[in-house]
Image (spheres, rainbow, N blue to C red):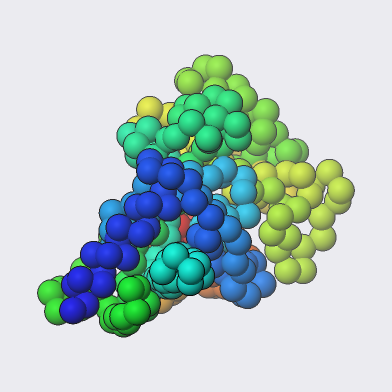
Amino acid sequence: MSEKIIARAGEIIKSKSAEVNMGAGVTLSLVDHEGYPTTSTISISKADGINQILFGVGLDSNKAKRARACSRASLCIFDDDYENNEYYNITLVGDIEILTDHEIKNEVWYEGLAEHFPGGTGDPNFCVLRFVTKRYNLWVDDEEAIGNLNAKTKEPEKTKSPVFEPILIYTGGQCANAIEAYKKAFGAEVTSITRYSEYNPEGAKLSEEQKDYIMNGQIRIGNQTILVCDDTTDGTKPGNRLQMVMEFTSDDAVKMAYNTLLEGATNLTPPHNAGYSSCVAYLTDVYGIPWQMMVWHG
């Protein structure tokens, strides 16, 4: 019985997508920077039943910022047209991530997005949110189904390897200028930008000029992703403006890595919540290599 309801729910979701007919009644709930669930309407670009749902949004949008900070999300598709026997409520809970791969951007593109992204799929502000369902609560055709997706066949989740990325650190607010130079010199593509004014670190004393500095940026040159940021502490000097970054998927993984490298390390900043990341830590290991360990992409 559940399989029938799940299949019917998948048909309804597809009917709400841009590839068939852009419909109303689709809401996405994400966790905001203060830890509160925040719900807003959104258009579905493409869907694979109830398993996976894709949205086209802006990298600078609140949705993308919230998805970057916390991967937990909930989706609701509903209609209350009783007269035409069109009453259903499809609630999905799962994880969401930001994708900037050109192939997936081309896959989800539809004509209505051109109004927001004049550069088409190559617009640096255009990205994809991918929602993957973990559990569902469905009321369709006067029948209900509640459960975990693929619970019977799901294998134990394998530990994900961290993502390795270098970070370039700039003084005097020169990060934005450097990005423009790399665009011209190397064809660099900007995939995300977060300024200090968006996530002001607790206790940080910033001037009005520094609030516009880049706190976290991400660019891509060829197939290599590079992180960039402005330093507001005047702590960097020529020769130490490059730092190794390891992106983990959980706070515990960050803490374990930090503690493993702790012996003999210097320049210690223990694991803490930084606003843009639920857990971030810094140290220079015993061999003199500076490391930043963090949760970012969820």
Q: Position of residue 263 (x, y in %)?
A: 41, 72
Q: Residue at x 30, y 58 (%)?
A: 11
Q: Does 269 appear above or below 162?
A: below
Residue drawn at 30 percent across, 61 percent down:
10
* Residue closest to the far left: 153
Residue 2 appears at what percent x and percent y? Answer: 21, 77
Residue 89 visible, this angle = yes
- Quarter that holds the N terminus: bottom left
Position of 167 compared to 253: left or right?
right
- Furthest residue in direction top, as rendered: 185
Percent x, y of residue 201: 70, 63
The quarter of the image holding the C terminus is: bottom left
Q: How many marks?
A: 0
Tell me: residue 109, above or below residue 68. Answer: above
Residue 119 falls in image quadrant: top right
**Depth check: 84 or 280 in front?**
84
> In the image shown, does 198 or 55 lie closer to the viewer?
55
Q: Residue at x 48, y 31 (%)?
A: 111
Q: Residue at x 53, y 35 (%)?
A: 113
Q: Is residue 257 visible to the viewer in this orientation of the structure? A: no
- In the displayed image of the protein, which residue is found farthest to the right? 208
Question: Farthest residue toward the front?
Answer: 83
- Residue 42 at x, y = what percent? 54, 54
Occupied quadrant, residue 158: bottom left
